[in-house]
Amino acid sequence: MSLAIIGMPGDRPLAPRVTRFTAQFWDALAEGRFLVTRCKACHQKSFPPQAHCKSCLGCDIDWIELGGRGRLYSATRVHAGPARFAAALPYSVGIVDLDDGVRLATRLLGNAGPEHLDQPVQLVVTRYQDGPLFAAELVAPDASIP
Amino acid sequence: MPLLGSADPIAIVGAAATPVGRLAPRRGEPTEQLEHEVLAEVVLRALDDAGIGNRDVGSAVFTLPPANTLQLGFATFMCARLGLRCTGQVAEVVEMGITGGLAFDQAAADVSLGHADFALALGVSFQSAMPAADAMEGSIRVVGDVDFQSPFGLTPISWYAFDAARYLHDTGASREDLAAIAVKSRQHAAHNELAQFGDPLTVDDVLNARPIVEPLGLFDVPAIADGAICLVLARESTARATGKAFVTVRGRGFYHEGFHQVGDVPGDITAFPAARRATDAAMDRAGIQLADLDLAEIYAPCTITEVLVSEALDICPRGQGGAAARDGETAIGGHLPLNTSGGCLARGHPPSLTALYGLLELRQQLLHTAGPRQVNDARLGLHLCELGNYNAALAHVVEGPQ
Ligand SMILES: [Zn+2]
């Protein structure tokens, strides 16, 4: 399933470095697919993706695509941030528990905050001029039914 | 092999520190003092306190100066100025909030192993001249995966905000409960000559302050601060020969859960199991239980942090950490006073030095030299510092003179 792609103004405030390995994640993300790595031996998922399993150190891994649906585990609105994020203040960030059992930290769109914990969220791709990032946005209760 | 908690345990035989606050030259103003000048004065006072000279020191373990410190190679630079000739080690150590505790641990290990008779755990931190927005340019790279978390602008205290939001959501506790920690911290700091903020604060002051990282406001989070501190360590047998009063380390524990900030496996981020494991290990080594402690000095940069640590250690029940502060249970005179120095919020928080200031507070309390903030008959204290979002913790149990 494909994530919604949302256009953002300007460049990413801080651009991730991309390696030969992590390019597989960022290239898929640019097309709306959110990938994590999974160990073929013990099925441990890893995010951020990595070339070996952090549980058994096995190097035989798969890339699997997640649906991007989850719940907001925690959230804050940042009112004092680094200089490069000054134009975005205040901005929201959160911890998202994906339905696939993976936890991640990310930007929250739509001014979500501490009052929205446990509400359903959906990962989206944020397309900046210099490349993609991901973010999460609250899912309206009625929109959660396909 | 003699180690911490052994028959010849580690003693703190001398100490000195500057008040926490603004020491760094302000931009556009004349330079009063630089880092090495301030620290040299502190070391001379600490050696005098221990009754020893520079040639008695065999190890000098410095906290790594912050990134804006121009003088690099700081450890040997300082040793040269102080005339130290070391047989154990000269080093700068660092790992986020545990840095001061790590300097203490390495100095302790050196005297315990016989590499030195006296070892210094010391450091200086000038950060106040740097605007917070510039400092956070660096700190966002410390507290997250630079490629997969930092691009979202996750500041160090945003992790504590995550703790606070989840804690308030899960327990039904309120921002007023968190504010009780800030109010109590100021009350303690009012009697600490080393404190950055000794003025009283009300719950309303805390609640009405501008938001920093919701639900935390200005007085729920630490201010930027400078400091300089030096502790002098020796084996107990060596300390006894100095004829000076000293305190001893009776137990030590450490645990890292294996996460860097928030891991990819869902779980309760407010539970702080590493704090519990490290503390239990230190208390086991010391042969004591929580009820034996007379006070604890814990690394708690934000109001929520002290709440969560006090609950993780079973000092108070889940959801009651703020209420325990408000009711005086964790205040001086209460059941188990926490952060009698005023802690990070009021004594002040130069992050790399905070653990050393915490150990200094235990020493003062256990030597019964804490003045108006003295905990009556204090004999056993716990020190706890952390890194990450308490993903790792380092605990020491310290005992006063027999
Ligand atoms: Zn595996």
Image: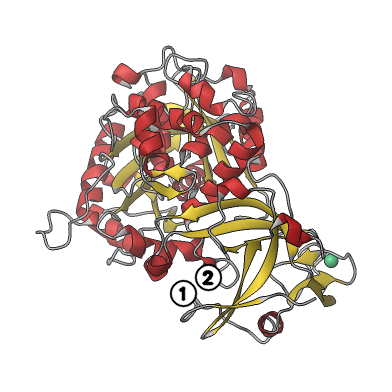
A13 or B46, which is in the foreground? Answer: A13
* SS category of the residue bearing label 2: helix
At x 27% / y 54%, what residue is drawn? B128
Residue B202, x across and y down, in percent: 35, 27
CB contact under 8 Å: marks 1 and 2: yes
Residue B144, x across and y down, in percent: 56, 62
Q: Chain of mark 1?
A: A
Residue A15, x across and y down, in percent: 52, 78
* SS category of the residue bearing label 1: loop
Mark 1 is surrounded, within 10 Å at the Cα level, by few (under 14), some (14 to 19) or many (20 or more) other residues, namely some
Q: Is residue B343 visible?
A: yes
At x 69% / y 51%, what residue is drawn? A119
Q: Indicate how the structure is coloured in the image.
A: secondary structure
Q: Residue furthest front?
A: A142
B179 or A137, which is in the foreground? Answer: A137
Q: Which residue is mark 1?
A: A13
* Viewport quadrant of the N terminus of chain B: top right
Q: Which residue is mark 2?
A: B151
Q: CA distance from mark 1 to mark 2?
A: 7 Å
Q: Chain of mark 2?
A: B
